[in-house]
Image: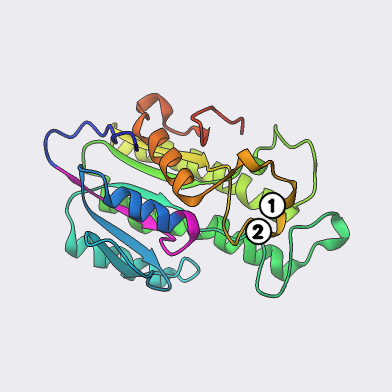
Amino acid sequence: MVKKLELNISKESIDAIVIGGNGGIGNALVRKLSQLDEISSVYCCSRKKPNGLPSIANWIPFDITIENSIIAASQNIKRQSQNVRLIIIASGILYDKYANMPEKSLKDINADYFFEVFKINTLGPILTAKHFTSIFEKQNKTIMCILSARVGSIEDNNLGGWYSYRSSKSAVNMMAKTLSIEMKRKNGDSITALIHPGTVDTSLSKPFQSSVARDKLFTTDKAAESILSVIGGWNNECNGGFFAWDGQMIPF
């Protein structure tokens, strides 16, 4: 059972936005949010419309690599809702359609692939925050949750490799930390924080699942429930934090 989102909003229900709502985790988040009593509408932002959207979910065309698309999506939602209190950015890339994979060593670094990873994993969330935070910065308690990865932790890096992915996630962590400070100045009840969802059984992790213990490979539904459970427990002290799927803090 998903823990209730403790957003401290009296009696009224709220709207939520999921960026990357057609991905494995993003789509599960859309479905799980749609089942919560305190959610009145969910805006599913993605390039392609997911199949079988819940009745309270609205698809918004969105491409995280194109700023004009981000602007159009934010304006579209502003016209429809005055009560967005939760934004979850669940988009990301680990390898591309050209078979570029995470680097095992320096010799594997490819400049075009490196920039593409940063464009989606780092610049995309920054631009999304630029245009989407204005949707709720004058509301009461608001939450922006950005999916990151434990391998983006500089302190926790004991294996090396994966230069582009690690670096893009470290950079988005810094972006979120900086954003959390700015948003707090605008709205003392805002929370901006990061979540590592664990290793989830999606197309993104498929090539790397052989080394993952069976009990550590989560379904998308399990990942979504864990993410919402952690978010439901956030308070002002969590602003700017980096959390694992079980609520434990991860070092930056």
Position of 188 compared to 119: left or right?
left
Mark identifier at residue 206: 2
Q: Specify the farthest residue to the top.
A: 237
Which image quarter: residue 38?
Answer: top left
Residue in the foreground of this view, choosing between 236 and 195: 195
Residue 68 against residue 34 in the figure, above or below: below
Q: Residue at x 41, y 58 (%)?
A: 27
Please state which amino acid type lies under the numbered disc 1.
Answer: Gln
Residue in the foreground of this view, choosing between 109 and 219: 219
Provide residue 226's location: percent of width, then percent of height: 45, 38
**Magenta span covers which residues?**
13-25
Q: Are marks 2 and 1 in contact (CB under 8 Å)?
A: yes
Question: Residue 24: within the magenta?
Answer: yes
The CA distance from mark 2 to mark 1 is 6 Å
Q: Residue at x 50, y 38 (%)?
A: 177
Please state which amino acid type lies under the numbered disc 2.
Answer: Lys
Which image quarter: residue 244?
Answer: top right
Position of 10 compared to 106: left or right?
left
Q: Specify the farthest residue to the front.
A: 214
